Image: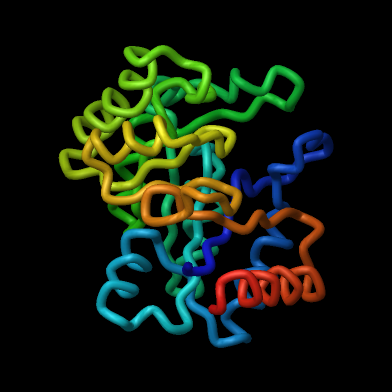
Amino acid sequence: MPLVLMYHSVDKCESDPFRITVSPDRFAWQLSWLARHGLTGVSMRELLRARAGGTARGLVGLTFDDGYEDFLGEVVPALHRHRFTATVFVVSGLLGEHNSWDPGAPRKPLMDADGVRWAARQGMEVGSHSAGHRSLTGLSEDALWHEVATSRTALEDVLGGEVSGFCYPYGHAAAREVAAVRRAGYGYACAIWKSGLSGTHALPRTYVGDRDGALRLRAKRARHRIRWGR
C-alpha cells in the first residue's frame, strides 16, 4: 500500500478545533522535509499510474480534502516550488460556498468552479469528495448514489474531463459504499483508516497536521512501513 498523506487546509488560523489546518510556514517545511529525504509528492493519479508500472519508489501521495480556497493561494505555489503535485477532493454541490458541515469550526471558503479549473490547469488532480459532504454510511440507496455518482458528473462538467478519484467524507466507508463508488466508475477512492476493505477503492491515508515536525513525520513514515512493508 503506498504512503498517502492527508491534508485539509493550509492557512493562518487562530482557532482550529478539528486540527485540519496547517500553517503556510509549517507546510513549506514539511514539503522541504519530504524533498530532503528523497521523496516526491505527487497526485493520486500519478502515484497509482507509477505503482502500476513499477516506478512508484520514492513517491508519496499528497491529498487535500474539502477543496478549500487556500489550496489556490497557499498550496499550489508551495507545491510548484518543489515540482510536486497533489490531488484535491472537492465537494461538488458546495463550490464557492463554505464548510457548512463543520458548524463548530471557523468558517472557511471553498473553491468555486473557476478555482477548480485553475487548479487543474496547474497540474493538480481534482477528485470528488461527494456532492454535499454527508456521511455516506447512513444514507438511503438513492441518496448514496446522488452523493457518489452525481458529484462525479458535476465535476466532469466543470472540468471538461474525466474525474477518476473519490474521497469518502469523514472516511466513513463500508462494503456498500465502496461498491457504489466502484459502480459509479471511479478508478480509485481514498479512505482514512486501514480496514478489511483496504485496497484501490479504500486507500488508507496518513493524517498530517500543524504539529507534525521531523520526529512525528519520521514516526508516521516508519509506522506505514511496518504496517504495509513499504
Q: Quadrant of residue 20?
A: top right
**Count of marks, rendered view:** 0
Residue drawn where x is 38% and y is 48% of the image? 201
Establish if 193 lies above or below 216: above
Q: Is residue 22 left or right of residue 86?
A: right
Q: Quadrant of residue 98?
A: top right
Residue drawn where x is 43% and y is 83% of the image? 57
Residue 100, image x, y percentages: 59, 18
Q: Is residue 70 left or right of residue 141?
A: right
Q: Is residue 3 left or right of residue 222?
A: left
Camera-side residue of 85 and 5 = 5
Q: Is residue 138 left or right of residue 179?
A: right
Furthest toward the left, the residue is 160
Q: How is the image coloured?
A: rainbow
Camera-side residue of 154 and 164 = 164
Furthest toward the front, the residue is 196
Residue 56, image x, y percentages: 38, 78
Residue 85, image x, y percentages: 42, 64
Residue drawn where x is 69% and y is 77% of the image? 222
Q: Quadrant of residue 70?
A: top right
- Image quadrant containing the C terminus: bottom right
Residue drawn where x is 27% and y is 32% of the image? 152
Establish if 128 lies above or below 138: below
Residue 177, image x, y percentages: 41, 32
Camera-side residue of 228 and 31 = 228
